[in-house]
Image (cartoon, rainbow, N blue to C red):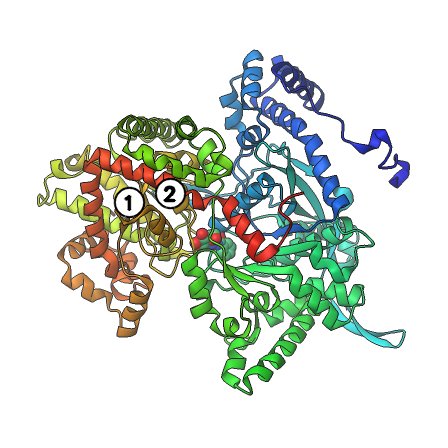
Amino acid sequence: GPNGALEATHPLALAPVTGPASNVDGFVRQFLRNLNYERGVPLSASSPNDQYFAFAMTVRDYLMARWLEDLRRQRVTQSKSVCYLSAEYLLGRQLDNNLLASGLTDIATEAMAQCGIDIEELRAQEVEPGLGNGGLGRLAACFIDSLATMSVPNIGYGIRYEYGIFRQTFVDGQQVEQPDAWLELGSPWEFPHPEFAQTISFGGHTETYDDEGVTRSRWVPSWNVRAVPYNYMVPGYLNGRVNTLRLWSAQATNSFDLRVFNSGDYEEAVRAQTYAENISKVLYPEDSTPQGKELRLQQQYFFVAASIHDFLDHMVADDFGLENLADRVIFQLNDTHPVIAVPELMRVLVDEKKLEWDAAWAITQKCFAYTCHTLLPEALEVWSVELLGRLLPRHLEIIYRINEEFLLEVRERFGDDEIRLRDMSIIGEFPERSVRMAYLATVAGAKVNGVAELHSQLLRDKVLPDFNEFFPGKFTNVTNGITPRRFIRLANPELSELITSALGTGWLTDLERLRGLESYAEDPDFRAAFREVKAANKRVLSDVLRARDGFEVSDGHMLDVMVKRLHEYKRQMLKLLHIVTVYEGIVSGRVDAASVQPRTFIFGAKAAPGYAMAKRIIHLINAVGSVVNADERVQGRLKVLFPQNYNVTLAERLIPAADLSEQISLAGKEASGTGNMKFALNGALTIGTDDGANVEIRQLVGDDNFFLFGMAEPEVEALWARGYKPAEFYQHDESLRRAMDLIASGAFSGGDRSVFEPVVSNLLYDDRFMVLADYASYIEAQAKVDAAHADEDAWTRSAILNVARCGFFSSDRSMRDYIDRIWHTPPAF
Ligand code: BZD
């Protein structure tokens, strides 16, 4: 074997050593061994962090043999693997998930009790890895969970950011960002493998040379960094499978300082090191508004180049035959962030492996598929030719050639239609020459998918219609999903138990079985039990918010929850106008407080640090909250809570306690949403627009169990076409006027009218997301919510039906769809 190690066929080398005994005694022994021999402390002197580490390591030890076996099997069978390329994985805490997947929860709990340790205290030690912004990153985490649970060979590739999404704090109601030093105390879940580091190059120039009579191109880069892989276990749910998540960390190479700075000066050399290590230093907190920053492009190329080389070097057998690469791997591009992988694979095939261009292009077109997650034009990523050419000169040449040949084909099909050619070119000319990454992905990918039916339809019809015409059959839909292991079983153990008591086990991996709950909606005992679960979840949430934020959650309130990134298109302002309307109605004496259903409104939202309007809206929510919560006249009726730093861990507590789920984006703007699915599956009713996956949720649960409001996408289009004048809605709607005037009056800013003036005038004179146009309809729908909530039994029936009818939204189903429509991988190994 390598380095004189035993051959793989030798009995000692063949199988991994088995893990600790699967009983309490085995767990205790392994735990103490880890505490003593890995942490170097006796139990009596161990800190909670020591205990957490030793505990996590023990869980790892149980999974290790299976992990090694699955890695071996992926190499031996050479059956087609899915490589998910994603710049973000919003994993959430790992401990409980890994306990659940390995079936160790009870044993581990008892083992800790025997050691005199409170397992809850250990759980609290874990800092969640926040290596993503929102939906896109969380989706990647759900997908790799489902693939492992379905025994599909998969490697998730991404970036090991040293700092994840910022920690949000509020100072005087305004967002202040703190660095997320999630690795400060180390992480027990990662396995660095510096020996498998890849060298990733940047800069320099290209040249042609004579290769035995053939003229070839090559890249002569000017600097490089080391990409060090860190492996994470991705265990399937109770199936003995463990897949791998491989995240890359940037380190300086020895030659780095010499090559780039060539100064021989020590301080300069250290600076150079910092420059290299900056690449994986921090997650970009900008969602939906790409910044076009150089470091961002460095991050993208860094992780996809490392991933492609890693897979080719270690996972593809020497005799496999590159021309068959698409039988070995499909690289799924999670949005455009990893699209620079396309020219990288071309470069490897043409420049390094010396394949003909056409042969290389044929392979490449089969190895990639692209998922689009947006409809906002400003969110479509472009890179200036100047920057791309400076950082990756050979890739730019390759992109030019791909574009040239593509436009030739377009010309052949459609003739010299210059407008069409300009519109379809991968290179845009205005406002500067730049590479349109979504176009590159569409041209190169075997398939392009949107993330909900409506989104995929709009993608075909509105965003990329020329491409849809040119590539018939390339566009498809895969509606998003969520993992029921984390978002039902772990987040809502009481509901899970209730479901199991009705349906038996098996539903967690076959979520359509929840249909069986439909008949229970008619059973008064079941409804009472269901209500009790909700009440218990509210008590848990109440404890969490008291400890975390010092909030008191009032008993008997409807919990009305809106949690998601702060963005104008998501329309937190619409929610706020509703709250101000109800508040104003009571304090002005026009509405009797006693007639208002008690409600607690909960917001959770981070704003991109550079997004001024989003930050102002956060400030306004907090300001309204302070005034409303302090006003005697609405005591016991209205409460507004905005816990800081909404993250996966908090979502797991908020969602199971919610009664009402707010999914109120302007129709045609939210690609899918996934929070909407989590709420419905935890028995909240949705108030929502006809947008994203809301459309499919409503179709499944039925109109009677969903509060629909607002314009549908064609009406939005029609209103724009007619000419939208938000001020007219303000003038013609007294209740809207009162709410807006109250905000403008300074009532929430200590009389200072200037603080929220920009928010109000933005709505009055611009209102890109038509908040005012949908206001009346929203208020009307909220009145229906109040009426419905007054009938406890009917509400509970609806809530149960939401759970029963949303099994479709399991990410296991999403994965089946990807396999059937895009990947065509064998079902399992
Ligand atoms: O992706 C989101 C969409 O807005 C949701 O509608 C959808 O449900 C999810 C999953 O498909 N998009 C994002 O979350 N996008 C980002 O986070 C992002 C991050 C960096 C740069 C651009 C966008």
Q: Residues within 10 Å of mark 2 (few under 14, many from 20)?
A: many
Evaluate whether residue 800 shows in this view: yes
Q: Compared with residue 266, is residue 184 higher up or lower down, i.e. above or below?
A: above
- On the image, numbered disc 1 is attached to which residue? 705
Q: Nearer the viewer, residue 155 or 387?
A: 155
- On the image, numbered disc 2 is attached to which residue? 805
Mark 2 CB in 8 Å range of ligand 1?
A: no
775 sits to left or right of 44: left
405 sits to left or right of 97: right
Evaluate whether residue 221 shows in this view: no
Mark 1 CB in 8 Å range of ligand 1?
A: no
Q: Amino acid at mark 1?
A: Asn
Picture residue at 67% right of the left edge, 27% below the top: 61
Q: Compared with residue 48, is residue 13 higher up or lower down, i.e. above or below?
A: below
Q: Residues within 10 Å of mark 1 (few under 14, many from 20)?
A: many
**Relative image position of residue 712 (x, y in whole percent):** 30, 61
The N terminus - image quarter: top right
**Label 1 element class:** helix
State if disc 1 and disc 2 touch (CB < 8 Å). Answer: yes
**Label 2 element class:** helix
